[in-house]
Image: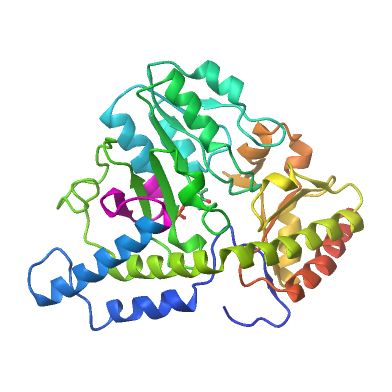
Amino acid sequence: MPAYLDHAYLDNAATTPMRPEAVEAMLPYLTERFGNPSGSHAVSREAKKALEEARDVVAAALGASPGEVVFTGGGTEADNLAVIGAHRARPGTVVCSAVEHHAVLHATRAVGGRLAPVGADGVVDLDALAAMLDPDVSVVAVMLANNEVGTIQPIAGVAALARARAPEAVVVTDAVQAFPWLDVAALAGPADLVAVSAHKFGGPKGVGALVVRQGVQVAPIIHGGGQERDRRSGTYNVAGVVAMAAAMQATIAQRDDTVARVRRLRDRLADGLLARIDGAIETGERANRVAGNCHLTFDGIEAEALLVLLDGMGVYASAGSACTSGAVEPSHVLEAMGVSRARGLGALRLSLGPTTTDADIDLALDAVPTAVARLRDG
Ligand code: PLP
């Protein structure tokens, strides 16, 4: 990452800088080792070997066997293949949590699915979910960690409910935001389909994977040459896959240390902002969120204006709101958690990553209260 002296990149949930290990690993496959793994000559075989070695690494990182890994063009595609592919393989009702990323939420909507509510803490309401499950349900999708507020979901509990009440249902978990922070192999173990995206943990954009457990059926959503055992067609992004594997290895090797260090930074940031800004409220439960997520709401503030001021001060963050046809709306996540519209419009997500430093936190602790005060003073 460029060493910005007086800038703080606190938007790691949006994307992360690439890890040097990942850049180094991918370079040969962008240059001299350019082969298409689907061919049979030596140049292809070299690429195929790299692809399959990367598959072994990705499989181990996700607690899967190599044959269960389907490479995709990112997290959105992995989520769509999971929800729509499983629904096509076995039509029925699709149920997802109300706080899913749009990749799952809109895929669920596209097949006429239903939303399971969450509590004020952002955790899926297991009783309400149980009441929605019956043998006609074909897909149950609950993310492992939320992209806006960082809440960690009880996937083992969700899977146990699904097995009991909708025995034919495929359990999907979007682990895109979880991978940098959590042991996905263990926590997503009970799910049938597990989605990840490389750019959230120091890999390149536009590459991801879906674990499809042995025996689980997903119909392809992209048709063509039949790569990935007919589950996903398209020429392989060899360089991207190799870099994703390298980023996974580095992430896992450093994960315990990174989590401990970043959690300390995040706590200093959250506590500092809560102490310095009147009316600031932390969203959800800090104990049950990934280490890199700091999410606050402020009253009397419009997040879009706050982001502009922060940008000018060198603090790069994001809001929990979306601009649809010119109107700013609070996010569906905050709405599902019962956060009021006024507070939802004043939401700020500061997401830390492995490259975040104490200096970044110092800058944010100075800039955010200053910007909020400026907006409140009008
Ligand atoms: N799922 C979650 C939870 C995400 O945070 C994201 C990215 O923001 C995605 C899916 C989509 O991944 P990608 O950007 O690789 O399409």
Q: Quadrant of the N terminus?
A: bottom right
- Residue at 29%, 65% in the rendered image: 237
Residue furthest to the left = 41
Q: Viewed as shown, does residue 138 lie left or right of 346?
A: left
Q: Which residue appears at 71% of the width and 83% of the height?
A: 5
Q: Position of residue 297 (x, y in %)?
A: 78, 47
The image quarter containing residue 2 is bottom right
Q: Is residue 362 above or below residue 143?
A: below
58 on left or right of 158:
left
Residue at 21% in and 72% down: 47
Asked whether residue 104 is in view, the answer is yes
Left/right placement of residue 95 relative to residue 46 reads right
Left or right: where 59 falls relative to 150:
left
Q: Position of residue 168 (x, y in %)?
A: 35, 23
Give yes or no for residue 64 being in the magenta stretch.
Answer: yes
Q: Which residues are magenta?
A: 61-79
How many numbered markers are drawn? 0
Of residues 143 and 148, the one drawn nearer to the viewer in this rendering: 143
Is residue 326 among the parts visible in the rendering? no
* Residue in the foreground of this view, choosing between 168 and 201: 168
Q: Quadrant of the C terminus?
A: bottom right
Residue 150: say if magenta. no
Percent of width and height locating residue 331: 64, 41
Residue nearest the observer in this picture, 149 or 257 = 257
Residue found 52% across the figure and 41% down from its top: 143
Q: Is residue 94 above or below residue 46?
A: above
Q: Is residue 321 above or below residue 7?
A: above
Q: Is residue 2 above or below residue 87?
A: below
Q: x and y percent of residue 100 in the render?
A: 53, 39
